[in-house]
Amino acid sequence: MEHTSKVIHGIGVSPGIAIGKAYLLERGRIPVPHSVLLGEEAVAQECKRFEDSVSRAVSDLESIRQSIHPDYKDHFHVLEVHQMILKDRLLYDETLRLIREENLNAQWALMRSLAKAREIFGALDDEYIQSRVADVDAAAERVLRVLSGQERNTFENIRERVIIVAHDLSPADAAQLQIEKTLGLVIEMGGRTSHTSIIARSLNIPAVVAAEHATRWVPMGDILIVDGTTGKIIINPSEEEISTYYERQQELENYLKEINRKAHLPARTRDGHLVKVEANIEMIEEVVAAKDHGAEGIGLYRTEFFFMNRTDFPDEETLFKEYRDLAELMAPQWVTMRSLDLGAEKLATWYPRIEEANPALGLRSIRLCLHYRDLFKTQLRAILRASRDTANIRLMFPLVSGVGELLEAKQVLNEVREELTLHRIPFDESMPLGVMIEVPSAVAVADMLAREVDFFSIGTNDLIQYSIGIDRANEHVAYLFEPLHPAVLRFIGQTVEAGHKAGIQVALCGEMAGESLYVPIMLGLKLDSLSMNPQSVPRVKNLISRSSLKECRRLVSKALKLTTAGEIQQLLERTMIKDFPEEFRVFNPNSLTVEEFTVLTKRRTRNRKRNRP
Ligand code: PEP
Ligand code: MG
């Protein structure tokens, strides 16, 4: 009989290849009986049964929380949120009321109060709160399982090394992941920055998210191949596919082992030019990965992640301790802390949301901080205080649009410094200050901004969005999200030039910093440092040390004469195949020779012209 395998695609969010048996994290329906209670005694008993079940669910969550390795504890604030939801009026009191007043059995009463909670959340027209409905569901499901005596088909039943396939992984689920038994992850939900993706990357587990209908297509126990780089999943692969991927897995592992050995050396080009390679982190736990992969500092700490998934604003002391720990862990290397970059897609519950037609153009980032000054000051105070002992913290403001806004933010910083001085609270008086260059207006006045700060860091994720005028998260215009758009490259070049003229260093910390294809162009644009996800550090360092600045400069001159991102991409791919064939082959499964590549790119150009939307 002919072998049939099936291929589905998602987004590869944690590189590597997993080959193994699928374990479906079942979310089987829990039966919800409906009955009416007769007599006061039955009602009292049912109330007690419900209260006991909630206590049991809360204590289960507590034991999960306790069992989490201390290094990962901060990933799981949401467990506390689930514990709180269970005791919240909306679910707890309402369910008890329904049992008492309408004589309903506990499961049915809980379903009714859950429906009401969903309705209330749904009517709020607040994306963040609506996304919290999943937490309410997950918390309620836990109680329902206790009430029905049905424990979940979960991680405890896993007896061998498997690839976990699930619709979604709640933080509670992720907390129970047994690393040694988890070969890979396939998740139907999520994106590059979802919780699961961040955890998978920091645990080095190959993972694919946004794999639509994976739980429908993948039968329990079937063999899977998961490619965490390309996002490809092969269900029930042929012998031939398995051996091809084993070879790739081996090749990838050998390649990474080889470059990891050199990851702790400085990244110096063949002609002696030194480039700093740093890591982007969202949580303090990622410091381990950053150090292991040879990062020479933290080039971007996205501080806002510590503020999300929380029910209230963390106080100054909590922030101070977090920042001081981070600074101590990294000392003597730099930690570049970005002040809160909340708003747009990064939301938190504890500040009053303002209705906006265009959140990406609205009250986000530094604008939000200048609006809620107390919050801003609290964070700045914590950062300054944490800088005292190790003096290795640098601060930068995100999304600054011009000098006026920068001066306003600097004014707030000065007020905080004065307050601390007045109260004799010590801090690093020479803490360097920088701005992120993320909007075209900042590029246009980069020379003026440069006079006011100690460094620049270019945030290309936003710079691309705002210069091309496309929503970075909108799949309909994703084809226009072009890091190699000539305008973007010019903007980067102009920023570097303005910075260097003023004698300050210029870094790049958008996603493109970690893409090996772009390394020669970023070198040629004379960036002083690149900051990226920790896993990319060894690859980028390796490519830098094998490049020549002079040749990269020539490449940039050539690239800047080309008129489209497509042509520049082809130029870079040709360079890559010629100069770094192993890197290209290992990360491009269908690796090509230069001749094959030339044929393919011609065909691609033709198709692109034909398929323009
Ligand atoms: C950027 O915009 O490039 C950046 C680094 O910041 P974020 O992705 O957090 O907006
Ligand atoms: Mg940004």
Image (spheres, rainbow, N blue to C red):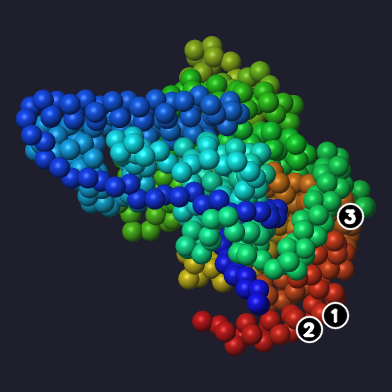
- The answer to whether mark 1 and mark 3 are in CB contact below 8 A is no
Up the image or down, 342 lies above or below 92; here it is: below
User: Is 342 left or right of 198, judged from the image as shown?
Assistant: left
Q: Is residue 439 visible?
A: no
In the rendered structure, which amino acid carries the disc numbered 3?
A: Arg
List the single residue furthest toward the top: 424
- The N terminus, quarter of image: bottom right
Up the image or down, 221 lies above or below 338; here it is: below
Asked where in the image residue 302 lies, by quadrant, the reply is top right
* Percent position of residue 598, x then y: 80, 80
Asked if ligand 1 lies within 8 A of label 3, the reply is no
* Percent position of residue 159, x then y: 60, 41
Q: Is residue 220 visible?
A: yes
- Numbered disc in front, either 1 or 3: 1
Q: Residues within 10 Å of mark 3 (few under 14, many from 20)?
A: some
Report the residue marked by disc 2.
Answer: 599
Residue at horizontal 48 percent and vertical 28 percent from the top: 65
- The answer to whether mark 1 and mark 2 are in CB contact below 8 A is yes
Q: Please, what secondary structure does the residue beneath circle 2 have? A: helix
Report the residue marked by disc 3.
Answer: 546
Residue 595 has which mark?
1
* Percent position of residue 118, x then y: 26, 48
Q: Nearer the viewer, residue 336 or 47?
A: 47
Residue at horizontal 75 percent and vertical 68 percent from the top: 240
Asked if ligand 1 lies within 8 A of label 1, the reply is no
Q: Nearer the viewer, residue 395 or 12?
A: 12
